[in-house]
């Protein structure tokens, strides 16, 4: 493709209103143009990359017997009423009326449509399993669209839906999808982790989020290098220390601790480290109250607490409740001498002679030891893991990274088939609701995530699997006719084997180089002054070094290196 | 692809509510499912064919330097107000409000968006010409959606827009597009004609419609075999006969013609043929009145009349107006003895001794001759051509065919660039509005048009260029394990070179054959009883004959024949 016929409106200035790195780079590289808040035109470079991502997704879906369909954007209200989501989805669901005043939603997802599609056509378990997918524009009326394509109102998704007559079949397809997603995100060049996304409360893991590791991400992921381990920090299990034999310890003492109400001020006051302190919290669990002890430097994790107690109705006790229970205030709470059941985080188990609040303002106990000075109801994992601790699966010390959700696999079970009467006859002739799974990939999000992790100060560095072109040929001096002819010939030759963008524009070399770095194709070939001596300059985008090569060697160089 | 994992819900009955052949066949072949009036889900077979059509369109657009982009579905009202179309488009424009009560249109076409896109980015004529295209879902709220995908409310279009700093450049791209469209419609297997779509009144042809010839079409096309000639019947020029030397003729006679008010009753009364009669019409042209004479069997063509008189304000004179002018009524009108200017259709020029009305109820003149009995203001082409007449370009006798519009190329000129301020600086540094062209292909329409012209009583017959699969392998008896194994091996082998659909379902042979004919893949291979002797049955979908071939010869057979 000749760049003079392309449309790549690059920018020199850094756009002010862009709120993420990928957003800035896409604007600077002339890849997108905003038409309204969260609504973009995808310019040629973007469209080429999207086509490549879509093709990879399509291949991996086909490889697991996914069958492509195309469902409508306009969804009749009646179907969303059947599922109960016409109301429940709220103002993120875009709605409209047609000329006959009939209500439609603009599809943000297609569970209703696909369930309605199949309930008329599916009679017997013999037609199952079945996996349908589509790649399509979706709509979600985000309250605050931001980060360019990462949180837009009109975006491209691959969504897939699977249908099964038994759990084993759903499990199998879920597993196939999980593998396919792993292949997709590897192929497009993302450093990603599959993260268990929900708590175990409902019964076993039935959804994973695929998170691309990137600074802009809205979730924190705990992961380890060189392994598959990854968990949303809300779920990442903390290491459980081996139980140590403890001696009886020193005697409890009550100490006046004026103005001390935080662990760090207590540590300072007692001249110990933060890790040697404890913190005590009173939690309301349904209608009861419990006391939780953590090490002073740790943070309470309410998701784990909910999982431990098997209820969602957990909250911090109010100051008033605490006053009623202990006649004390937060900042001086402790387990000694209370009737409340006391739960200790695993990390407190091997601590000894530690300070706690005395349930009296301005006083702490020191040299407290559990078992001796108070009863332990149970030990458990009640806190967020911290960086550097051993991962739950022993694969190494965890690191933290922000993550962008680029995909999710989800076992829906019978939620939609029951609400919308999608049944089949099973082996015994009984009518049973169909089991379903749904599986999404954010195509335009994936593109943004790729840019978030493949760039340098000068622009994008496309992974080869998704790059819009393979090679960028540039004439350094547009007035040099001989060089232009040589470039033309090279463009023709390489074009037989590679997708070549040929910068034939009448622009200064500096402009061309800057644009080339922004656009970020894997290889750049500059046809300059040395072309007369049969030489061109070749540079890989991800390298700082360029080299002069005889023109005739360029093809071979690319064959070896590409 | 194994058919057991596909989703092709074929039907045996002919669906009652389908109102076109392609609609019926798409329903019977399990290709579409209606979700609301004019809104369909495209099932797997349809999606595969659409992907093929889109790829052909993409290739031909790329070949003429068209650059692919992706513009949004949601169009801000403000842009449509700038072009004046927010009001003008009427109720076919689907509209919605977002959560902030901002108005959007659901794009039926993208002139506003693409013009707004470029006006910020395009500064100089040096960046032109430029051709952008997209393949995308469009929305039009048809009052009466019908014919399946032919007239839907949500449909897939390829739309392209070109930008130019001078007419010559626009002409060139228009010509390139015309050629690309010809290639596209040839490649997908359509019998099509490019038809001049508008009258010459505005000044030269600046739009062509590409019509696929098909019975269901809403327009009538006059065309000739073995040539490119085609015209909408409203524009198709009639042959102009050579002027013959006429003798002076018989004397005019006034005859009583009681109850005669039509040409056919006059012919019967006078015992002459319809072709020997004439018909006289009074037309109001702006504020004047003219008389038009046609041969009795011809039909007045108001489009040609408007073109002849250079005005759109033409209508039949009312009975009252005629009474005022001639003291006569329609049915007995004629040119003899009136003051009105009389225009004769070319076909009347060589007529002699013909009857006309006498401008007196119940009487006609016979043996009328123009020039002798009344003055001729002018001869002209005022009628519709009839089948069998020589085409205007002399390429042969015209035939009539209904046509489906599958594409249109259109010179927009500066309509949108002037309304929306899309200007560039020209060679002399002057700001000039950009010239634009727009070019559409109805992708889902094209699919319907292909089916309209490629089928037989049993189902679809896909052209190879767009077929969803190349080969259909069928096991005749699902219980025959040996045959199943042979089929499996054949599926693997052929799958390396062809796209194979393998009917591995546990269905009766009759069901499989009927489905296979409906789906219409180019070649069917039946693995039946003879498989044990190493033989299978091969049949081309467009042939009535099948042949038994050694399994080892199948590949070679396909290589030669496909």
Image (spheres, coloured by chain):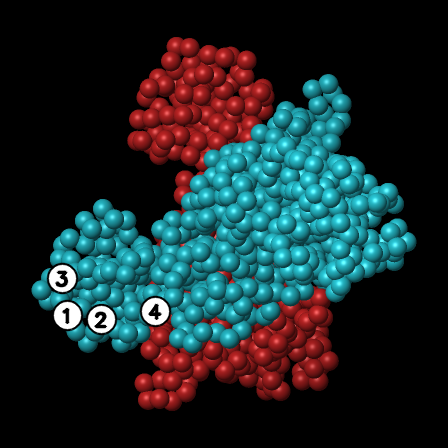
Chain colours: A cyan, B red
Asked whether, in this view, residue B21 is left or right of residue B537, the answer is right
Residue ID for mark 4: A515
Q: Nearer the viewer, residue B301 or A176?
A: A176
Query: Mark 4 vs mark 1: same chain?
Result: yes
User: In this orientation, does residue B535 appear?
Assistant: yes
Q: CA distance from mark 2 to mark 1?
A: 8 Å
Residue B403, x across and y down, in percent: 51, 55
The local crowd at label 4, few if under 14, some if 14 to 19, many if 20 or more residues have their Cα within 10 Å, is: many
Q: Which chain letter matches label 1?
A: A
Image position of A484 with respect to B462: above or below: below
The answer to whether residue B117 is left or right of residue A409 is left
- Between marks 3 and 1, how big is the CA–CA gap? 9 Å
Badge 4 marks a residue whose secondary structure is helix
Q: Residue at x 61, y 30 (%)?
A: A171
Report if the CB atoms under discs 2 and 1 are less than 8 Å apart: yes
Q: Do the residues at pointers 2 and 3 share their chain?
A: yes
Q: Is residue A116 rendered to the left or right of residue A329?
A: left
Element carrying mark 2: loop
């Amino acid at each position: 493709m000749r760049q003079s016929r392309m449309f790549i409106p690059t920018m020199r200035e850094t756009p002010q209103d862009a709120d993420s790195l990928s957003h800035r780079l896409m604007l600077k590289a002339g890849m997108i143009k905003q038409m309204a808040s969260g609504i973009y035109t995808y310019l040629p470079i973007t469209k080429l990359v999207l086509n490549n991502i879509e093709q990879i997704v399509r291949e991996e879906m086909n490889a697991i017997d996914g069958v492509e369909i195309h469902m409508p954007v306009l969804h009749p209200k009646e179907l969303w009423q059947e599922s109960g989501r016409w109301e429940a989805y709220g103002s993120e669901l875009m709605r409209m009326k047609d000329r006959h005043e009939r209500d439609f939603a603009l599809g943000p997802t297609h569970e209703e449509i696909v369930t309605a599609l199949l309930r008329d056509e599916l009679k017997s378990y013999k037609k199952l399993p079945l996996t349908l997918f589509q790649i399509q524009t979706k709509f979600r009326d985000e309250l605050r669209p931001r980060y360019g394509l990462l949180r837009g109102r009109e975006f491209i998704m691959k969504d897939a839906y699977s249908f099964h007559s038994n759990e084993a079949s759903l499990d199998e397809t879920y597993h196939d999808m999980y593998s396919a997603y792993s292949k997709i995100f590897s192929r497009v060049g993302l450093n990603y982790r599959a993260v268990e996304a929900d708590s175990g409360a409902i019964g076993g893991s039935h959804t994973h989020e695929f998170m691309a590791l990137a600074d802009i991400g809205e979730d924190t992921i705990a992961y380890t290098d060189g392994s598959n381990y990854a968990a949303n920090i809300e779920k990442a299990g903390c290491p459980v220390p081996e139980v140590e034999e403890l001696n009886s310890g020193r005697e409890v003492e009550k100490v006046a601790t004026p103005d001390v109400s935080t662990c760090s001020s207590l540590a300072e006051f007692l001249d110990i480290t933060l890790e040697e302190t404890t913190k005590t919290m009173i939690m309301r669990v349904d209608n009861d109250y419990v006391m939780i002890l953590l090490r002073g430097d740790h943070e309470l994790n309410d998701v784990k607490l909910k999982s431990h107690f098997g209820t969602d109705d957990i909250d911090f006790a109010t100051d008033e409740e605490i006053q009623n229970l202990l006649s004390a205030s937060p900042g001086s709470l402790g387990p000694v001498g209370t009737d409340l059941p006391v739960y200790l985080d695993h990390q407190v188990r091997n601590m000894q002679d530690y300070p706690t609040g005395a349930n009296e303002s301005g006083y702490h106990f020191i040299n407290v030891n559990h078992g001796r000075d108070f009863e332990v109801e149970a030990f458990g994992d009640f806190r967020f893991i911290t960086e550097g601790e051993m991962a739950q699966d022993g694969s190494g010390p965890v690191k933290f990274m922000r993550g962008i959700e680029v995909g999710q696999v989800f076992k829906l079970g019978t939620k939609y088939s029951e609400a919308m009467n999608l049944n089949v006859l099973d082996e015994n002739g009984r009518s049973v609701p169909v089991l379903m799974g749904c599986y999404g990939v954010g195509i335009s999000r994936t593109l943004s995530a790729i840019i978030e992790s493949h760039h340098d100060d000068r622009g994008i560095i496309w992974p080869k699997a998704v790059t819009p072109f393979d090679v960028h040929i540039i004439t350094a001096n547009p007035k040099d006719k001989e060089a232009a002819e040589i470039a033309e010939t090279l463009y023709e030759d390489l074009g037989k084997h590679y997708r070549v963008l040929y910068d034939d524009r009448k622009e200064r070399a500096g402009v061309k180089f800057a644009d080339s770095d922004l656009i970020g194709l894997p290889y750049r070939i500059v046809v300059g002054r040395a072309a007369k001596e049969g030489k061109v300059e070749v540079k890989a985008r991800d390298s700082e070094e360029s080299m002069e090569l005889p023109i005739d060697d360029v093809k071979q160089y690319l064959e070896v290196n590409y």
